[in-house]
Image (cartoon, rainbow, N blue to C red):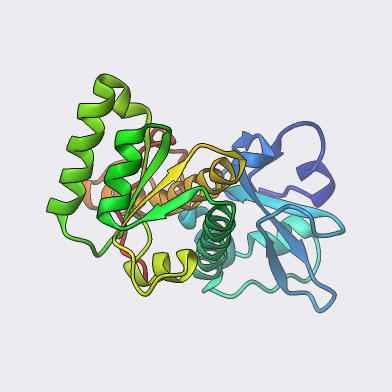
Amino acid sequence: MRINSSAGESGSERTCIVTGVKDDPAAMLRFALAGDGSVVPDIRRNLPGRGVWTRLSFEAVRRAAAKGAFARAFRAKAEAPLSLAETVDALLERDALQSLSIANKAGLAVSGAFKVDAAITAGGVAALIQASDGAADGASKREQALRVKLGPAAGTIARINVFSSSQLGLALGKANVIHAALKSGAASSAFLARAERLRRYRASEADAATRTQSGGAPADSAATLGRPDELADRPSD
């Protein structure tokens, strides 16, 4: 499929250079071309010049790099390392953690089991955060407290468990963090949007592996991902 950069950025939708799927720019990944011909992930979609797009998908980026899709889309020399999908993952992860740090500096984050429990009791919690390497029973206690407080509405609260305790500690200014919570606010909303992008990007990798093992749909086909508040488990590297 040959999609030039001009066509890829026209109109209100963008076209994935791997699958041909069209979607809103906010739901996709943009890549720019550096002067030396290297492909540069543009996760904030603000680099100058023309760009090309893929689905928000580890598998789509992997296939684009492996099959020379960037050079065809840019119609120019475009060098994309086979590790590009992992690079994008690291950038999305760092972007989310930086956003969490901003929410913390804005006074919207609390950490530690007792403080999280107190925040749940007080109300106004926008998200529960559990370290990916934390014990399951601790997460269950926070879940139970949230259900007691909110009843069925507890299902509307975001759950995030894609970061390790050391990553959360660095973002929140603590040695290690197993349990944390976010209060409602603009900075919290910004973090949740970035965490959701990371979840969706990683979920596509897990979906592709599952379909391959079960003999299902090919790995580069469009997948329907979960609700934004269902952030999938995946230990950080």
In the rendered image, residue 180, in percent from the top left (x then y), is placed at 36, 53
In the picture as drawn, the residue positioned furthest to the bottom comes out as 36
Q: Residue at x 48, y 45 (%)?
A: 196
One can see residue 90 in this view: yes
In the picture as drawn, the residue positioned furthest to the top comes out as 152
One can see residue 20 in this view: no
Q: Judge whether 140 appears above or below 170 on screen.
A: above
In the rendered image, residue 183, in percent from the top left (x then y), is placed at 47, 41
Q: Residue at x 59, y 46 (%)?
A: 187
Q: Relative to 108, is 213 on the left or the right?
A: left
In the picture as drawn, the residue positioned furthest to the left comes out as 137
Q: Relative to 229, is 92 on the left or the right?
A: right
83 vs 156, nearest the viewer: 156
Q: Residue at x 64, y 59 (%)?
A: 69
Tally the marks: 0
Q: Relative to 55, is 14 on the left or the right?
A: right
